[in-house]
Amino acid sequence: MPQTVYIFDFDGTLTTRDTLLEFIRYAKGTGAFVIGFLLHAPLLVAMKLRLYPNYKAKQRIFSYYFKGCRLTDFDDICRRFARDHSSKLLRPQGLATLRQALEARHRVLIVSASIDNWVRPFFSQIPAATAARPDSTPAEAEQGALTVLGTRIEIRDGRLTGRFLTPNCYGAEKVRRVLETLTEPRSHYHIIAFGDSRGDKELLNYADEPHYKPFRR
């Protein structure tokens, strides 16, 4: 019998809105948030017009706010952000579905374009869940475990460089990261996937049971 795997997009699917914007506002304050986005307004317009790649715009904005930040400080902000915003951002029905999958000992993946440092803490307190890094041990990757596959950031000498270590986890990259994680032949898995945007199209097409814009009731 195939192994059942639940795959959830994060922003907009499990959450009510984009967490990148919420995280920047939380970490830097409303004033710095507004100034930074005003400075990058031409870039954002070019991105919306598809004249500039989404992932490059995202990296430049991330670099503007966080380049040079110590990893320990950044991770501390990520943990506090999740602690203070879980009840505000997470959709109850989505969280309930995720919990049920874990309780049934199914494998659960969170596949997100957001930075995995702040996605992972949202799930660290869920009973029976192991919020594992992509380089987790085989024991952590067994059934009943939760793995976060997000955009990873580059660290040098304990500080953020402002660059991404992996491609932006969006579109076809989501499927590539899933294939990298689920190493058995495709027939070994029965995949149930949840998404809400263009960035989830390839993932939903790859799934056996795709669910578009769930958890909205």
Image (cartoon, rainbow, N blue to C red):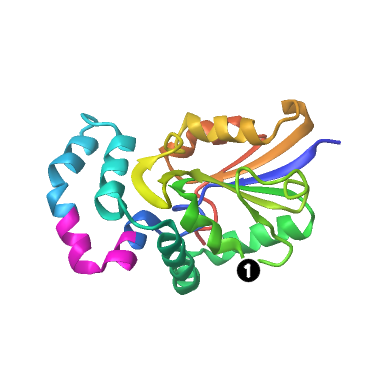
Residue 43 appears in which quarter of the rendering? Answer: top left
Label 1 sits on residue: 125
Image height of 79 relative to 48, above or below: below
Residue at x 33% of width, y 67% of height: 26
Residue at x 74% of width, y 37% of height: 190
Q: Quadrant of the N terminus?
A: top right
The residue lying toward the viewer, choosing from 30 and 137, is 137
Q: Which residues are magenta?
A: 24-36
The residue most toward the front is: 157
Residue 35: within the magenta?
A: yes
Q: Position of residue 38 (x, y in %)?
A: 13, 53
Q: Position of residue 175 (x, y in %)?
A: 56, 32
Image height of 188 relative to 145, above or below: above
Residue at x 43% of width, y 46% of height: 155
Residue at x 38% of width, y 52% of height: 159
Whether residue 4 is visible:
yes
Residue 30 appears in which quarter of the rendering? Answer: bottom left
SS of the residue under disc 1: loop
The residue lying toward the viewer, choosing from 19 and 140, is 140
The residue most toward the right is: 1
Whether residue 18 is visible:
no
Left or right of 184 on screen, residue 134: left
Q: How many numbered marks are there?
A: 1
Residue 132: within the magenta?
A: no
Left or right of 199 on screen, residue 144: right
Q: Main secondary structure of the magenta part?
A: helix
Left or right of 70 on screen, residue 41: left
- Mark 1: which amino acid? Gln
